[in-house]
Amino acid sequence: GIFIMAKEESIQDILNELQERSGITFTISDSIYDEETTRQKIEDFLSFYKSNDTRNNFYVQFLLGNLSEQELSRNIAKYHISKATPWVVFLLCFEKAYDKSTLSILFHLLSPTTDILVEIDEHQIALLRPLQSSLTEDEIRSMALSLIDTLNMEAMLAVHIGYDACVSSFEDLPNSFWNASCAISIGQQFHLTSSYYGYHSLGLHKLIAAIPKEKAKEFLIEEFPDFSFHMLDNEMQTTIHALFTNGLNIAETARCLYLHRNTLVYRLDKFQKLSHLDLRNFDDAVSCKIGMLLSDALQKSDHSIN
């Protein structure tokens, strides 16, 4: 009796660890095998999850650039990874920690024999996808949108996705992953309205983000000594953004904002008195755009300006 009790406890220990790793509660109601064989079968399941942990750790360290060439070559052979094919990486960043149900939804969206999910941490998952041929930026963006829509509808999770252009081989993915991570950081830093950020389509935002903070503060103080962009109310900020979106066209901006043209002109005159910038002038509009982006970047970093 003591021997059997020890075996049963051992099986339960394995079941508990399996639950911890998989997020699924397992119980044994019946088995065609004897007790020792049943125990071995459960251990096989546990070994599967442990091997997945090892595999995930390899991909995490690979994407972070922490592996030597020898370690990389050994694991590429071990996991039968296709090297000579285009790849694309999507970095999914969840506002709240994801759970096993999120992974389950993602698995249903993937090609199980080729796509690779990498759990970076409790808020980030990387999707590595091999391709038959290189995709355009629009095609990659469509993939990102599909992932966002599905997760929003089925998991009710807010998610942001960063992505890069295709790379020509598996070994190039760490740099692509870094770009995707930067894209998310820049998108959130400047409060961009979309939930997806392509590294090569961030334009001026990417350039501004690379400016050292001290240089940004110096520029704002020199160019706008008596003015702060944080003085602007929401109405004025919306007006300025609409003007930029419509190529500084007064008529189109007024129509977009449902304003009379004279009302828009009045607002622009008011802004000019505050900032000494005439947004109908291209050079002044450029200075304003750069100033607003720098102010946003510094505010996000908790730096005071002016």
Image: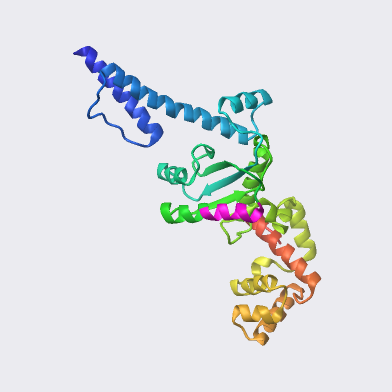
Q: Is residue 39 above or below residue 306?
A: above
Can residue 105 be seen here? The reply is: yes
In terms of secondary structure, what is the magenta stretch mainly?
Answer: helix
For the C terminus, the image quarter is: bottom right
Residue sticking out furthest to the front:
132
Q: Is residue 10 above or below residue 131?
A: above
Q: Is residue 118 above or below residue 13?
A: below
Of residue 187 and residue 137, the one placed in the foreground of this image is 137
Q: Residue at x 79, y 75 (%)?
A: 281
Residue 271 found in image quarter: bottom right
Q: Residue at x 72, y 72 (%)?
A: 247
Residue 224 located left or right of residue 146:
right
Q: Position of residue 129 (x, y in %)?
A: 58, 42
For the N terminus, the image quarter is: top left
Which residues fall within the magenta stretch?
Answer: 136-146
Q: Residue at x 64, y 75 (%)?
A: 239
